[in-house]
Image: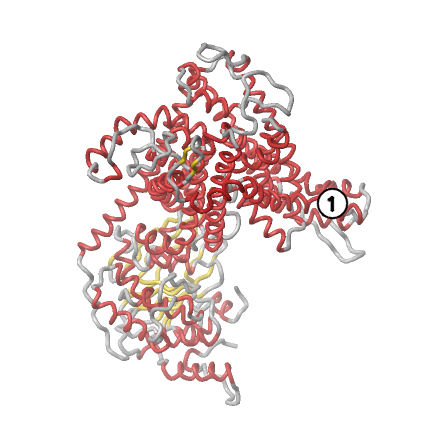
């Protein structure tokens, strides 16, 4: 192994190197172009909704009931109210179960059952919402013999649970262990510690999770098709069919009437604004919540 | 926060911050009680188990409610082409076909697109742009399906009808898959709209997977004289391959479950069309269209069975996807996406 | 009490050690026999292969290393030692432009490899084909052993028929061939830590570089694996110019011909406080800081 200094072998021709660098430039440009195209697509979609929706929005839209088929004018006030009603009903189911389930996973979750639950939450999140609608139909609509807001709220509540559970677990895990230890060290019970110390510390993040879940289910249509079903009039009881904004948008979008189609755009604009605002708030809140809990995320 | 909390052995000085003192004050006010603790634990456990109950419940309900259909048609349900509620002949093959074709079109379009954006975001984008770009992708994910459907009807479909499909027919019309009249609505429209809707999923998960590739792998490749693209294609992508496949499988699960947007642009036809220009239906869209009006028990039962197929397929795809993704990037990878 | 007596006096006493300690002793004895006082190196021309001139590195506004002037001789081992944070790795990474990967890093000054300034060059790929690097933790790709070694060569367009022979040659030079020749298609991750690091060395060699940079290559390895790699380094310097950053002073004393000592000043910028023949630096250090570091009073 003692050969004296050997001259370095000749390098491969420069052509190959040029080709490699060209390929690098082309691919980098391609990545950029594709990203720009996607942003353009987003702009086109949101742009259309904003432009078409804004031109159809007026005061009546928010306060009047729908007019009969073919007649121009009116609004979707009952659908707006119906959506609010459905969200409230869904939250009654989804928020407590989601948060308490999240508490279990975060605080007592060091066992196989918890791992299974966590995995299943992802699975549940992946089930198509229309299948959840069928479930709600069988469990609520059939026994009640009618479509109802309860059935719709039930379906939407199920959809909310995995989202709220996931975000609650995340935020609860960020609460420093020292807080719990301090409370327990003083003789406070586990229950008191969680209810009075841990949960209050995590409130910001949990609220964010709830907001995200609401934004997500506010736009759900499929499970409502045969649970809440829709309604042309005001309706204030939970055991009757009720209108909802996404249902109304669907009905109007596939109709042949220009006025109704315009209202579909207007309704879409309302939904988009709701969703974007909630997403923005959630993003800002998450940043603040984690910082407030003393961690860098 | 000022000083940290120090716990010393009994009798020594203990320093607490204001916040900790506050906490102690609040916590001391409660009773200690094991009964309360156990009850609370049980309550939270029940809530967690609710997830299992729901998933199980959905499975049970679907099987029970589709019992009549399962009994009447058996396996032939999946291979029969005729869906005629009047004649009471139900075969779900057209919808399986529709779901497969639209999902395939969606994946073919969305995977390269999503992967490219994910690569740009993690490897090539200037740092200050990354957050806003990522937010843009999240925004796409947040738009409700019915809104996509509306946009699809009035923007996508006309473009397909007057520009894209004629062009494809002109250039590639000799292939059966691009033959036939250009309606605008149809399988291609369904596939396109689903593609737009699953791109954010692919982007989000791919980003996490790519970011989880150790920097040491990139450095090794760079140090050997690789260009940036060579580092991406030779070191990063191979390392993250199984995770990216997981992202694609997850997106496939999403694609199959997409309902409203597809229903609105797919043409709602019970035939099997060889061409993507043709009209069709998917498993999800047939339920959306016909469930509320299904008059008799058998009809309803067949639609529930279609739901059962959907349920089974998406669960399997989801499980496979999660396993693939967990292998590469552990932890909070796109969990709520 | 002066520290190490240079690399000719390393052998420990006692012959009744067994097991791991026996292996260590045998390897050390082999090192002693291979090592030759610096002035009588076979093959080394004594000429400078890599020269740093007034090199400064900034991360944003923070200066990480200050005004480094350092000549590293051809086909020798130059060791860069010093406490943590003294900029050793930062400096090493300048030589193959790896600091380009850090967003706010700025490198000023000249780094001449065979007279050509790599810091100003726009062809980073070509530089890295001539100046290779082995990292602190072994980082083989998720490919087979064969494909790992072949990776760089394939990148640079070595024709298929040459690849087989190149892979074997590189694995032999890395003292790994005998252990893997029957399992070239197995995953690189099936090897032990020490083997993986030798694989990384083979991968580096397969590109046929002129200079090999090693950034604490043994810090993640056990003592036996470490000694094997040190043996390897001494064999490799017949063909390659090796520059190694190490925390391990004894290692520097065992293997290197030239030692450069880095320290950080009050402004936390690293600087070169002393450089010279390894023998000298360890037995008669010129700078008091060197002596303090070597005797363990500093860092």
Instruction: Check disc 1 and report its element: helix, strand or loop.
Output: helix
Taking the spot 37% from the left edge, 33% from the top edge, the residue there is: B270
- Report the side of A18 relative to B303 (left or right): left
Q: Is residue A233 visible?
A: yes
Picture coordinates of residue B78 (x, y %)? Answer: 42, 44
Picture coordinates of residue B152 (x, y %)? Answer: 37, 28
Q: Is residue C255 above or below residue C62?
A: below
- Report the side of C278 relative to A196 (left or right): left
Asked whether A127 or A20 is in front, the reply is A127
**Dot 1: chain letter:** B
Q: Which quadrant would residue A261 be assigned to in this image? A: top left
Asked whether B268 or C43 is in front, the reply is B268
Q: Is residue C258 above or below residue B11?
A: below
Instruction: Provide the residue designation for mark 1.
Output: B40
Q: Which quadrant would residue B29 be assigned to in this image? A: top right
Taking the spot 45% from the left edge, 53% from the top edge, the residue there is: B324
Taking the spot 25% from the left edge, 48% from the top edge, the residue there is: A23
Q: Is residue A288 visible?
A: no
Q: Is residue A25 above or below residue C214?
A: above
Taking the spot 17% from the left edge, 58% from the top edge, the residue there is: A13
The colour scheme is secondary structure
Asked whether C105 or B25 is in front, the reply is B25
Asked whether A109 or C166 is in front, the reply is A109
Picture coordinates of residue B99 (x, y %)? Answer: 39, 40
Picture coordinates of residue A161 (x, y %)? Answer: 59, 39
Crowding at dot 1, Cα within 10 Å, few <14 / some 14-19 / many 20+, comes out as some
* Numbered disc total: 1
């Amino acid at each position: 192994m003692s050969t004296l200094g050997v001259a370095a072998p000749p390098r491969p021709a420069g052509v190959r190197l040029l080709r490699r660098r060209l390929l690098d430039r082309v691919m980098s440009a391609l990545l950029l172009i594709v990203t720009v195209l996607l942003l353009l697509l987003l702009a086109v979609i949101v742009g259309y909704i904003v432009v078409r929706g804004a031109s159809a929005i007026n005061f009546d839209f928010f306060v009047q009931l729908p007019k009969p088929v073919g007649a121009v004018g009116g609004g979707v006030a009952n659908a707006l109210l119906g959506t609010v009603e459905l969200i409230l009903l869904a939250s009654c189911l989804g928020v407590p179960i989601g948060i308490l389930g999240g508490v279990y996973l975060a605080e007592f979750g060091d066992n196989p059952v918890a791992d299974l639950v966590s995995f299943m939450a992802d699975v549940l999140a992946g089930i198509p919402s229309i299948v959840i609608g069928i479930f709600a139909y069988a469990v609520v609509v059939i026994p009640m013999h009618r479509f109802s807001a309860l059935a719709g709220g039930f379906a939407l509540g199920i959809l909310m649970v995995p989202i709220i559970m996931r975000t609650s677990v995340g935020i609860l895990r960020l609460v420093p262990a020292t807080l719990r230890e301090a409370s327990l060290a003083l003789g406070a019970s586990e229950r008191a510690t969680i209810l009075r110390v841990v949960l209050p510390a995590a409130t910001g993040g949990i609220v964010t999770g709830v907001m995200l879940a609401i934004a997500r289910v506010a736009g759900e249509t499929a499970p409502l098709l045969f649970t809440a079903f829709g309604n042309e009039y005001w309706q204030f009881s939970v055991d009757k069919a009720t209108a909802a904004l996404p249902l109304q948008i669907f009905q109007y979008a596939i109709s042949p009437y220009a006025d109704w189609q315009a209202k579909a755009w207007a309704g879409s604009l309302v939904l988009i604004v709701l969703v974007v605002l909630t997403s923005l708030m959630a993003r800002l809140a998450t940043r603040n919540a984690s910082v407030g809990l003393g961690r860098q995320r | 926060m000022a000083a940290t909390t120090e716990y010393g052995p009994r009798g020594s000085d203990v320093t607490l911050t204001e916040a900790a003192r506050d906490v102690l004050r609040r916590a001391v006010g409660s009773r200690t009680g094991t009964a309360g603790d156990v009850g609370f634990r049980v309550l939270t456990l029940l809530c967690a188990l609710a997830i299992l109950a729901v998933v199980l419940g959905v499975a049970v309900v679907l099987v029970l409610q589709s019992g009549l259909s399962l009994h009447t048609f058996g396996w032939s349900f999946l291979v029969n082409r005729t869906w005629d509620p009047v004649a009471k002949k139900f075969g779900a093959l057209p919808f399986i076909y529709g779901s497969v074709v639209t999902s395939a079109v969606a994946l073919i379009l969305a995977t390269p697109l999503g992967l490219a954006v994910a690569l740009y975001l993690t490897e090539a984008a200037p740092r200050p742009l990354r957050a806003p770009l990522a937010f843009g992708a999240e925004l796409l994910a947040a738009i409700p399906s019915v809104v996509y459907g509306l946009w699809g009807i009035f923007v996508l479909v006309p473009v397909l009808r007057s520009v894209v499909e004629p062009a494809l027919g002109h250039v590639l019309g000799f292939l059966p898959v691009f033959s036939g009249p250009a309606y605008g609505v149809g399988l291609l429209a369904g596939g396109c709209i689903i593609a737009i809707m699953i791109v954010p999923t692919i982007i989000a998960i791919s980003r996490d997977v790519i970011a989880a590739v150790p920097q040491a792998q990139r450095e090794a490749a760079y140090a050997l004289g690789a260009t940036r693209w060579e580092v991406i294609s030779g070191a990063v992508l191979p390392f993250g391959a199984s995770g990216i496949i997981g992202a694609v499988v997850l997106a496939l699960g999403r694609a199959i479950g997409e309902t409203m947007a597809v229903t609105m642009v797919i043409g709602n036809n019970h035939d099997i069309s060889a061409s993507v220009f043709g009209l069709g239906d998917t498993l999800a869209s047939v339920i959306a269209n016909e469930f509320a009006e299904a008059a008799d028990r058998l009809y309803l039962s067949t639609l529930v069975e279609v739901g059962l197929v959907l349920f089974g397929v998406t669960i399997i795809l989801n499980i496979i996807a999660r396993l693939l993704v967990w292998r590469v990037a552990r932890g909070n990878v796109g969990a709520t996406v | 009490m002066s520290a190490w007596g240079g690399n000719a006096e390393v052998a420990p006493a006692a012959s009744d050690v067994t097991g791991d300690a026996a292996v260590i002793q045998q390897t050390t004895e082999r090192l002693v026999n291979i090592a030759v006082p610096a002035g009588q190196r076979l093959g080394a021309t004594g000429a400078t292969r890599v020269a740093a001139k007034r090199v400064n590195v900034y991360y944003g506004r923070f200066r990480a290393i200050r005004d480094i002037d350092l000549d590293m001789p051809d086909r020798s081992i130059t060791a860069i030692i010093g406490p943590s944070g003294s900029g050793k790795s930062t400096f090493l990474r300048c030589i193959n432009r790896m600091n380009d990967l850090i967003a706010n890093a700025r490198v000023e000054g000249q780094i001449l490899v065979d007279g050509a300034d790599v810091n100003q060059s726009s062809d980073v790929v070509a530089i890295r084909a001539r100046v290779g690097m082995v990292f602190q933790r072994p980082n083989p790709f998720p490919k087979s052993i064969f494909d790992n070694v072949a990776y760089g060569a394939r990148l640079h367009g070595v024709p298929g028929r040459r690849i087989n022979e190149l892979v074997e040659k590189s694995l032999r030079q890395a003292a790994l061939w005998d252990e893997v020749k029957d399992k070239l298609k197995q995953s690189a991750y099936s090897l032990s830590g020490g083997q993986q690091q030798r694989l990384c060395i083979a991968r580096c060699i397969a590109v046929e570089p002129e200079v090999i940079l090693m950034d604490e290559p043994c810090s993640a390895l056990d003592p036996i694996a470490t000694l094997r790699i040190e043996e390897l380094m001494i064999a490799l310097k017949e063909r390659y110019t090796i520059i190694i950053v190490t925390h391990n002073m004894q290692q520097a004393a065992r293997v290197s011909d030239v030692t450069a000592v880095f320290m950080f000043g009050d402004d936390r910028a690293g600087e070169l406080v002393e450089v010279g023949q390894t023998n000298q630096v360890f037995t008669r250090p010129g700078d008091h800081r060197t002596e303090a570091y070597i005797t363990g009073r500093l860092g």
